[in-house]
Amino acid sequence: KDFRNTVKPNWCPGCGDFSVQAAIQKAAAGVGLEPENLAVITGIGCSGRLSGYINSYGFHSIHGRALPLAQGVKMANQELTVIASGGDGDGFAIGMGHTIHALRRNIDLTYIVMDNQIYGLTKGQTSPSSAHGFVTKTTPKGSIEKNVSPLELAITSGATFIAQSFSSDIKELTAIIEAGIQHKGFSFINVFSPCVTYNKINTYDWFKENLTKIADIEGYDPTNKSQALSTVMEHDGLVTGIVYQDTETPSYAEQIDGYSPNLSQAEMKITQPEFNDLMLQFK
Ligand code: SF4
């Protein structure tokens, strides 16, 4: 169960994305997958290179489009474990429409955002998760817009598994990815993954000083959605751990009565026009 390949990542030394890659590889092995059971689909950005660095099926897609591809792969082959991944720009700017609908659709896959609060690949522009007032070459007087709050977004969009972690805590990150893979529905994992080259504010030290572990909050119940939302808001989104999980809601595929991608139209005992209608839903 070796998910390593021979391709050497070209991320900058110290980039948080190395740990995310290692955690995915450990988690995949930890839940007993073989490379042929896993597909990793990525968008564009430094983090988008991930699909080429893991020994599994992989697809390096176009900007903001990892989720449509990943959802199509999963609906076409329910036997595959599917991980979609990308950065904060990929998922919360150009891909935001797909993110919201994937959160509420509950297709059984794991979406990992490597959130470094900046565009790294294009050399340091303000991103949707950059803080209000954040200074870069695109916002030289500070970002006027307020930042997107990924956890609030996921909670209010109806996601059934919502977690956050930090590249520096590979043990917690690996455990969360394992839990996300095992969750029967859409799992959203936002990972603070510092860009050491362009983001000199949200550094490893900054996160260490500002993050609170959900597990340390007395009486926290990850099945209580209103508590999840209020806790996230009280901590300005700076929490790590499993924030919310709903194990009751069936996945998208489970809710399609009688649907199986492995059945032919004849086996499903439906007419050709009915079969065509069904397939159109997954276009
Ligand atoms: Fe990582 Fe930033 Fe370098 Fe990109 S530019 S590889 S995000 S450190």
Image (tube, rainbow, N blue to C red):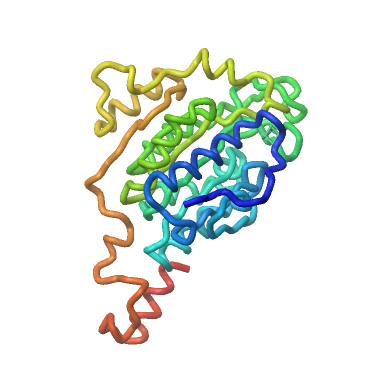
- Residue 281 figure quarter: bottom left
List x then y, in percent, for residue 83: 48, 51
Residue occupying the point 54% across, 19% down: 207
List x then y, in percent, for residue 169: 49, 26
- Residue 215 figure quarter: top left
List x then y, in percent, for residue 65: 57, 54
- On the picture, is 208 further left or further right than 197? left
List x then y, in percent, for residue 201: 65, 19
Residue occupying the point 73% across, 20% down: 141
Q: Work out whether residue 131 or residue 200 is closer to the camera in this orientation and state it.
A: 200
- On the picture, is 31 further left or further right than 132? left
Figure check: 145 above or below 93: above
* Residue farthest toward the front in the current orientation of the protein: 1
Figure check: 239 above or below 95: above
Of the four image quadrants, the one with ligand 1 is top right
Figure check: 236 above or below 44: above
- On the picture, is 154 further left or further right than 90? left
Residue occupying the point 60% across, 47% down: 50
> What is the tally of numbered marks visible in this picture?
0
Residue occupying the point 56% across, 54% down: 55
Figure check: 252 above or below 50: below
Q: Work out whether residue 212 or residue 101 is closer to the camera in this orientation and state it.
A: 212
